[in-house]
Image (cartoon, rainbow, N blue to C red):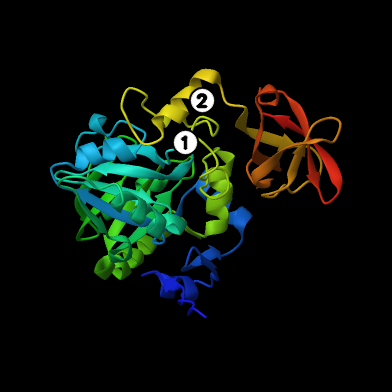
Amino acid sequence: MAETSEPIKTPFYQFHVEAGAKMVEFAGFLMPIQYTGITEEHLAVRNNVGMFDLSHMGEFEVSGKDALAFLQKTTTNNAADLNPGQIQYTCMTYPEGGIVDDLLLYRLKDRYFMVVNAANIEKDFEWLQSHVEGDVKLDNRSLDIGLLAIQGPNARKVMAELTDYDLESMAYYTWAEVPVAGHDILFSRTGYTGEDGFELYIPNEFCGDLWKVATEAGAKYDIKLIGLGARDTLRLEMKMALYGNDIDHTTTPVEAGLSFIVDFDKDFIGKDVIARQKKEKPKRRLVCLELQGKAFPRHGYDICDDSGKKIGQVTSGTFSPSLKKPIALGYVPRDKSKSGSEIQVSIRGKMFPATVV
């Protein structure tokens, strides 16, 4: 029998334990699921500011004179549009049109930097390696880098305590590499919460320093530590897709509402299938649902029409702390995907009315 490897502790593991976090294994890492409670943490980010450990995410560097051509082939968005300092949301697709992963692509001065989902690190790296042609160097930096996110309406105030960089004029989806808490750090104005915020890519040896300085600086703004539970409810309220739930190898960017990160004027793996689907219109679409009653929709629950016939499945669901009502994402046939369409979600044998919003 193969040995099961121990889950990896992030550079911030000890701080989570000291803060009383409930730790769980997630994508091979020991991660905090919550500290004081998902609803409290969620609302802290919506209304004030919170800090997340996202060190489980994967980071790859792509360099060499053929790096751009390689990225144009392997990702759907137009990497040629990126200037140094800019970031792009994009995805990789299979020849059949399904999604390998969604990711962020950073244009550094002399190379590119990809941030991929934790559960897909090995799969993504192997997929990229299998398509290397010419002068392309791939480097998996995932275990060398800690990642902290500071998110919420007051994120800029906290970040201003850590760096002299002009944050006010820093645009969304751009990055800078400057002294942060006394160390040269790459950070970006990005996030997965729908709020303003920053993500800091920290060499492991500086992680302890950064944590201490950020928590001390954040204390004057009542910063809260945020676990993966609230990260999930925050992104779900904003219809930000989660790989493995809302998108995967069986879903295309068109079905998932991600056509905006696909450039059909260039060639990439899977383009023919995806372009044909966009032209002919997909048979199903990913929609947002609001449910009535005291429902708690979860991944895998059936979505049904008026007659009770199954027409789809919930991909993500929760009770929304901001809206104070049950919400979900799921794929439904195109004729049921317009806003205002009425359908039902089956929860433990009972039907709950739901509306596409």
* Residue 291 placement (x, y as % from top left): 75, 38
Between 279 and 352, the residue placed more toward the observer is 279
Which residue occupies the foreground of this view, 141 or 219?
141
Is residue 50 in sight in this rendering? yes
Mark 2 = which residue?
277
Judging depth in this view, the residue of 110 and 334 nearest the camera is 334
Q: Label 2 amino acid?
A: Gln
**Residue plotted at (20% across, 43% down):** 67
Q: Residues within 10 Å of mark 1 (few under 14, many from 20)?
A: many
Q: Residue at x 47, y 67 (%)?
A: 28
Q: Residues within 10 Å of mark 2 (few under 14, many from 20)?
A: some
What is the C-alpha distance between the residues marked 1 and 2?
Answer: 9 Å
Q: Position of residue 350 (x, y in %)?
A: 86, 45
Residue 174 in view here:
no
Q: Position of residue 96 (x, y in %)?
A: 47, 37
> Splitting the image into 4 quarters, where does residue 126 fall?
bottom left
Count of numbered tags: 2
Describe the element under mark 1 as helix, strand or loop. Answer: loop
Which label was assigned to residue 357? none
Question: Which quadrant, please, contains the C terminus?
Answer: top right
Whether label 1 touches label 2, CB < 8 Å: yes
Secondary element under disc 2, as helix, strand or loop, is: helix
Q: Is residue 228 left or right of residue 211?
A: right
Residue drawn at x 43%, y 53% as measured from the top left: 117
Percent from the top left, x then y, of residue 233? 59, 48
Dot label at residue 97: 1
The earlier-in-sequence mark between 1 and 2 is: 1
Amino acid of disc 1: Gly
Is residue 335 shown left or right of residue 231? Answer: right
Q: Nearer the viewer, residue 236 or 273?
A: 273
